[in-house]
Image: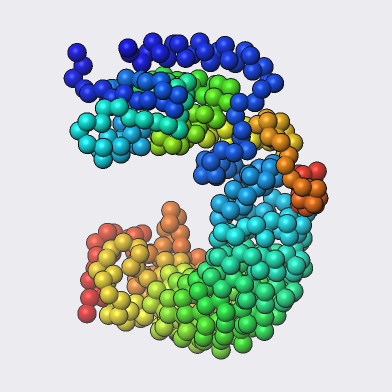
Amino acid sequence: MKGGELEVCFERLMMAGGGRMGGRRVVIDWSEIPAELLLRVVSLLDDRTVIVASAVCCGWRDAICWGLTHISLSWCKNSMNNLVLSLAPKLKNLRSLTLRQDKPQLFDNAVETIANNCHGLEDLDLSKSFKLSDQSLYALAHGCQNLIKLTISGCSSFSDNALAYLSSYCKKLKILNLCGCVKAASDKALKTIGYNCSQLQSLNLGWCEEVGDDGVTSLAYGCHDLRALDLCGCVLITDESVIALANNCPHLRSLGLYYCQNITDQAIYALAHSRAKNKHQVWGSVKTRDEEGSGLMNLNISQCTALTPPAVQALCDSFPALHTCPGRHSLIISGCLNLTSVHCACALQAHRAVNTLTNHAY
Amino acid sequence: MTSSKTIVLRSSDGATFEVDEAVALHSLMIKHRIETGGADSTTIDVPEVTGNTLSKVIEYCKKHVEAPNSDDLKSFDTDFVKVDQAVLCHLAKASYYMNIKGLLDLSSKTIADMFKGKTVEQIRETFHIKNDFTPEEEEELRKENSWNLFV
C-alpha cells in the first residue's frame, strides 16, 4: 500500500477530530514541549517577548531561564531594576547581559544580584547607569570573574579605587569601555589595569580628562595585545604615551587621539617606525597583503594641530591600511587644515603600493 | 519500477508508511539509523511520532526532496503550516525528534510568530496554558512585569 492512500485516510480522521475538538478538549500540552524546542522558538523572539514568555507558566520559566545565555533589557523603560532583581537569580547560564539605559534606573542591589548568581557572565553592558555606586564594582569583582567584556561608559559615579579593585579580580578582561568615566579612569586605575589585565585588547578612555602619560605608558607596558585604544579628549597626554604604545603594542590597529593637542610629529614618526620594528617581531603575518597584518587601520588625529604633512605622510606610507580615500576613510584629520595634502597609498598608482611594501623588507 | 530503495516508517501507533529512501533520508535521524542499522533495516520505528503527524512529515519531505527547486516551494511551506495549533505542535516536535532542519525551522518560526505582540495572559490563552505559579511566585512576577503596563 502506498503512503498516499494512508495519508488521505488520516487526513479525513484529522478533519473529523478537528470538528469535535471545537476548543473544548485540549489535545496538546504546550507547557510540556521539550525544553530544547521551546528554546529554539524563544531564540527567534525579541528580548521583550522572551521575558513575557518566561512568565507564562512554571515549566516555561524554568526552561527559558535555564537556557538563556544572552539577553538585553534595554527596552525596559521603567522597571529594569525590579526585572533584574526577579530574573537574575534564575539566569544561571547567562553569558551576556545588556542593561544600557536611556533614563538611569539601575541600583546597586540589581548588580549585586547579578554578581551573586550569574557567575558565568562574560559580557556586561551597564552604560549610563548613573545611579550605581562603587558597591556594584566590588560585587562584580567578587561574583563575575569571567568577565571578558565590560561597558561602564557614562557611569560617572564610579571611583578609581573601585575600578582598580575590579581589575585585580577580573583578569580575563579583553574589552573595557570607560568612556566618560572621568573619576574612575585615573592614572592610578590605569596602572592597575595595565598590571592585571594582560589580555586587554580594546580600551575606550574617551573624554576621561584625567588620563595622563603615566597611565597610558603603564597600559602599553602591561597590555601587549592592545588592538584598539580610544584616547579622544584625553587632553593631558603627550608624545610619551604614543611612543610607549608604538614600542610595546605591535597589534595596535585603531588609535583615537582626537583633541590630544600636545601630540607632535615625534609621536607620528614613532608610530611609523614601529612598523618596521614590529615586522621582525611578529611571526607569520609579515608578508601578508591583507589588512589583518597591516598595522594601524584607524587613526583619529583630528584637532592635533601641531602635526605636519611629512610626518603624517610617512605614517600613511608605513600603514597601507590607513586610508584617506572617500570609500575607506580611516585616517581622520578634521580640523587639521594643513594636512589636506596627505594621501593614502591607494589614492596613487597600484605600483606605488608595491614599492612601499618592498621598501620595508630589510 | 523505481530504481531507488524504499523504506517503511512505523509510527508510535503502528501505522506504516512506505517511502522512497531518498525521502526518508531527509530526516537526519532516519539517515543515521539506516547508516548504523546494517543492510536489513528496511523498517524504521519512529516511536515519538503518531501516524497522523508522520504522514504530514512525509508529505513535507517528499515535496522538499522531489521538487526542491520548484517555484511553489515557498507557498507550499506557507500553506503547510496553516494548521491548527495541536497539529503545529506535533509537527514541531516530530521535526525536532526526526531532525528535519527545514521543517523544524518552519514550524519554530510559525510558533514564534504566535507570540509576537502578546501579553502573558494572551499567550496563555493562545496556547491553552494554565497559570501554575504559586501566589508568592505570582506576586514576584507582578512586580517584575510591571513594565507590561508602560511598554
Looking at the picture, how far across and down is residue B102, in whole percent? 42, 33
Q: On the image, which quarter does residue B32 sit in?
A: top left
Q: Nearer the viewer, residue A342 or B27?
A: B27
Q: On the image, which quarter does residue A257 sit in?
A: bottom right
Looking at the picture, how far across and down is residue A6, in whole percent? 40, 13
Direction from residue A250 to residue A231 in the image, left or right: right
Residue drawn at (41%, 83%), measured in percent from left and top? A248
Q: Quadrant of the C terminus of chain A?
A: bottom left
Looking at the picture, how far across and down is residue A219, in whole percent? 51, 83
In the rendered image, the vertical position of residue B9 relative to residue A86, given as above or below: above
In the rendered image, the vertical position of residue B73 relative to residue B41, given as above or below: above
Can residue B54 be seen here? no
Q: Nearer the viewer, residue A144 or A27?
A: A27
Direction from residue B116 to residue B36 in the image, left or right: left
Residue drawn at (70%, 66%), measured in percent from left and top? A113
Residue drawn at (64%, 35%), measured in percent from left and top? B115
Q: Quadrant of the N terminus of chain A?
A: top left
Can residue A110 be seen here? yes
Looking at the picture, how far across and down is residue A262, in whole percent? 56, 83
